[in-house]
Image (cartoon, rainbow, N blue to C red):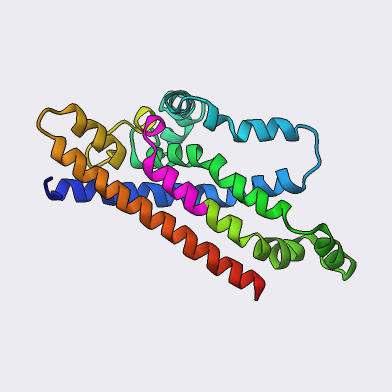
């Protein structure tokens, strides 16, 4: 097993940047989606639920290709963005977006379960006391759903860090630009004589994954103590 080169360290840092950006991008939208599914009663709710979970059942490469069609420089959305200097395809920002899309349904589920676990009588009591929707959201729903939000954030980060199919299709694997840890591992496996490098990168990925799981446990316990207190 070989040590990490400067290029490998740059790949790891870029991967962490992509995963963190994807998590921060998806987190507020995932919470809103979870809130809508848990509390909303509107036409098309089942359709929204299916659309949110679509990345889980589609091949990741297909998701990346759809993003490329929509957000590529010739796409209906990506074209106008490119004209104002915003380029997503084949860039680290595109890798973050693809990772966020793939992580999104995994983030929604624990948040939705946490919101659904909040007793309705608590919300009804606050409404009786004159609390408006915004006050109930900030003072009741958010604090009580913190364990689910923390779990969703860590799950999203872990998924974004390990995402391969969608990111390599939409953002490619350009060294120094969009080459993330999973893509680097795949390239090392395909290169004769690079088995030790692939193993080293796999061990790095495992360490980060374990740290993420440990972080999820710490965050969840903190959120539970905060909610109980």
The image quadrant where one finds the C terminus is bottom right
Q: Quadrant of residue 199?
A: top left
Q: Quadrant of residue 169?
A: top left
| Residue 180 visible in the snapshot | no
x, y percent for residue 140 = 72, 65
Q: Residue 219 vs residue 8: left or right?
A: right
x, y percent for residue 104 = 54, 42
Q: Is residue 121 magenta?
A: no
The foreground one among 163 and 219 is 219
The foreground one among 12 and 158 is 158
x, y percent for residue 180 = 30, 41
Q: Residue at x 48, y 58 (%)?
A: 216
Q: Residue 7 vs residue 53: left or right?
A: left
Dominant secondary structure of the magenta stretch?
helix
The image quadrant where one finds the N terminus is top left
- Marker count (numbered): 0
Q: Residue at x 60, y 67 (%)?
A: 224
| Residue 151 visible in the snapshot | yes
Q: Which span is picked out in magenta?
A: 153-167
Q: Residue 138 vs residue 66: left or right?
A: right
Q: Is residue 165 magenta?
A: yes
Q: Is residue 115 above or below residue 161?
A: below
Q: Quadrant of residue 41?
A: top right
x, y percent for residue 154 = 48, 53
Q: Residue at x 72, y 55 (%)?
A: 117
């Amino acid at each position: 097993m070989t040590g990490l080169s400067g290029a490998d360290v740059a790949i790891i840092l870029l991967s962490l940047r992509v995963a963190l950006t994807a998590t921060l991008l998806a987190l507020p939208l995932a919470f809103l989606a979870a809130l809508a599914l848990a509390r909303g009663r509107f036409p098309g709710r089942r359709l929204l639920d299916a659309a949110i979970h679509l990345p889980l059942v589609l091949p990741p490469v297909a998701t990346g290709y759809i993003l490329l069609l929509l957000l590529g420089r010739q796409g209906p959305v990506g074209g106008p963005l490119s004209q104002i200097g915003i380029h997503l395809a084949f860039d680290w920002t595109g890798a973050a977006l693809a990772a966020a899309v793939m992580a999104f349904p995994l983030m929604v589920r624990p948040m939705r379960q946490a919101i659904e676990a909040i007793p309705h009588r608590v919300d009804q009591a606050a409404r009786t006391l004159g609390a408006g929707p915004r006050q109930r959201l900030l003072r009741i729903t958010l604090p009580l759903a913190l364990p689910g939000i923390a779990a969703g954030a860590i799950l999203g980060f872990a998924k974004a860090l390990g995402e391969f199919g969608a990111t390599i299709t939409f953002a490619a694997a350009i060294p120094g630009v969009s080459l993330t840890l999973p893509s680097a591992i795949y390239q090392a496996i395909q290169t004769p004589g690079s088995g030790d490098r692939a193993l080293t990168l796999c061990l790095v990925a495992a360490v980060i994954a374990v740290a993420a799981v440990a972080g999820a446990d710490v965050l969840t316990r903190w959120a539970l103590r905060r909610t109980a207190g």
